[in-house]
Amino acid sequence: MKMKSGICAVSALAMAIFAGAYQAAAQEPVVIGVSFDKMESFREGEFNAIKAAAAAKGAKIIFQNAQEDAQRQASQIESMIAQGAKAIIAIPWDIEAAVNDANNARSAGVAYVTLDQAPADLKAVDFHVGGDPCADGTAAGEFFAKAAGDKPYKLLELQGGLSNDNGIRRSKCLDEVLAKHSNIVIVAQVPTDWKPEKALVGTENALQAHPDLNAIYSPWNIGLQGVFSVLEKAGKLKKVGERGHIDIVSIDGAPTGCQAVRDGLIDMDLATPVGDMAAAAVDAALAVATGGKPAAPTAFLPGTPYTPADVATQAPKVWGCAAG
Amino acid sequence: MEKVIVSKRPGDGVARFFELGLRLVAALPLLPIVFVVAVAMWVLVPGFATLINLENMARVLAPLLVAAIGATFVMLTGGIDLSVGATFGLASVVGATVMRDSGSVGLGLVAGIAVGAVVGAANGFAVARLRLSPFVYTLAILLTVRATAFLLSRGYSVGRLPSEATAFGRYQIFGVPSLLWIALVILAIGLVALHKTPFGRSVYLVGSNERAATFNAINVNLTKWLVYFIGGTLAGVASMLAVLRLGSGAPVLGDTILLQIIAAVVVGGTSVFGGEGGLWRTFTGVVLVVMLEKGLDLMGLAFYDQAIVIGAVILFGSAFGVYLRRRRNFGLR
């Protein structure tokens, strides 16, 4: 009898411990590893948006910056998995290496979501959300086509990093639109690897060779720093509508871009919907980590165009205007 | 039969152990630092001593160790090869392209390693035969080779490799990643070449005193050519290990490795002036660099904080090595 009651007591204790442990596990926040390719103002905006989205969902994040190194990014993702991350949200530095990173994570039972930069093979990841680089490139091309009208029009095209999707498609889709307009000549295509100093040198060279340059396409806001520096030096940094103004279109909606639009220095910026992207990435990561599925395997969100004429009304939709 | 009684004074064993330790530290001045950092990471960083992190570190260590072995040969002769990172990038592009287009991992590996060998052979010829300054010449080659990698790949990374490539990168033998096994085999071959062959003796002698080496009938030019050839070839091998791990090659893949290599070799205790150092020292240097990077990653430090810590440890480690060398052998004979 005594033995029976002893067994019962031990069983009850074990059940209580198990129930407690289960409850604790259930309450424990899901850990999401966030792996960025680099840090600059746009990435800071994205990181803040992810932090806010994760906090809203009660998830914990571990952050690592690969600083433009595919080997470091692979290693950091492995470290985050070792630290107990149940999902990874990555902005890949190398879109091909990202496929392998995704395979490794998923084979370890960890959800893998890409943000902003699509991997070479979208099927390799659980979910991808990004801007729509093609829609943005097309919108920029259409703006230039409208600005050119039937006149001869010389355009400098700065390109981003050609090892990632945004860099490739922001350029390709712009070129496809411009190819339909024989009066528009792209005087130079400058691969910048997303580096402002290369944008500066490219603009300087193009302006020397073509002092009658009509337009500049900067597919990311940070490139504007180099562009402005060269134009100012050459006495060509004029506001929109002023005589001698060079048409400029950029993409991102970062604080730099918003300020440039407010100052009337660029004609149009396309603001990437950073908040929506981050929220979608966190939702998908949590869904997969807890055994569910995202509603769709990909989401491409086109940028919001805003100009000096409507910046005041559009500002609430532009993350960089709010941050600035 | 008379019994021989060996009298032992109390403390003899301890003294011998202590002397052995001193000899080991004299040979590998970075060892105490590696030990301290390992213990500190073990205790302070959650997740550092886990199996998954150790495997991860092994995979990170492999390409760096192989490239650093090549660089050690070059530096032991008093030379330097600044093109190693660019060669790493070009070899990765060529190797990955051949793998992808031919569907053969083996062919891709041969192509990537051959790229390294060709660059190394050209470097050796320029330094040994044409007597160009290694610093200036390999800087020029760095730019040329990097540009070639960009031209060939048009700046894009090269992926979609046969699945066997990445499968091999993840494969383990006796629980140790296959990539580390390759690196350890290369380390063993390097040690034999450096310490058990006439070539190894010529490397040290050329680095210590080139004129004396010539008087000793050592073919200085051939020795110099060989070390650059080895350096380039091993940069190609290291690059292939990275490709197998990542499943892609890219012209920018070697951008950060040059500084890691120099840091590992120099902090390990190989002299930049040549003639002193060795592969075990480089091994300790590589282990320290990788441990710090991974440990600080796990601690969540940003890359700039990591750079400060790694810089400080390298500075302290190098200074400690110099201090030990000045008190060479602690009076040991």
Image: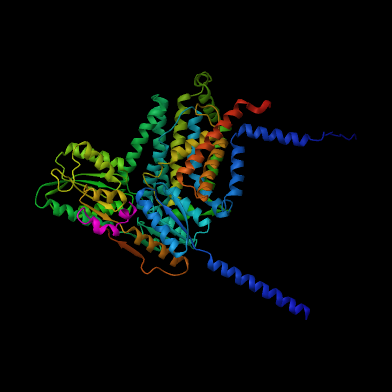
Q: Quadrant of residue B115?
A: top left
A315 or B139: which is nearer to us? A315
Q: Give the range drawn in magenta.
A: A305-324
Q: Establish if B17 lies above or below A36.
A: above
Question: Which quarter of the image is occupied by the N terminus of chain B?
Answer: top right
* Residue B160 visible in the shown view: no
Q: Residue at x 27, y 54 (%)?
A: A169
- Asked if residue A115 is among those painted magenta in the image, a careful observer would answer no
Q: Which residue lies furthest to the front in this view?
A: A312
Q: Residue at x 35, y 49 (%)?
A: A41
Q: Residue at x 35, y 38 (%)?
A: B145
Q: Residue furthest left?
A: A150
Q: In which quarter of the image is residue A140?
A: bottom left
Residue B130 image position (x, y, % from top left): 38, 24
Q: Establish if A275 lies above or below B233.
A: below
Viewed as shown, does residue B301 lie left or right of B6? left
- Asked if residue A319 is among those painted magenta in the image, a careful observer would answer yes
Residue A191 image position (x, y, % from top left): 28, 45
Residue A286 image position (x, y, % from top left): 44, 65
Q: Residue furthest bottom?
A: A1
* Residue B286 visible in the shown view: yes
Q: Which residue lies furthest to the right in this view?
A: B1
Viewed as shown, does residue A135 lie left or right of A80? left
B222 or A59: which is nearer to us? A59
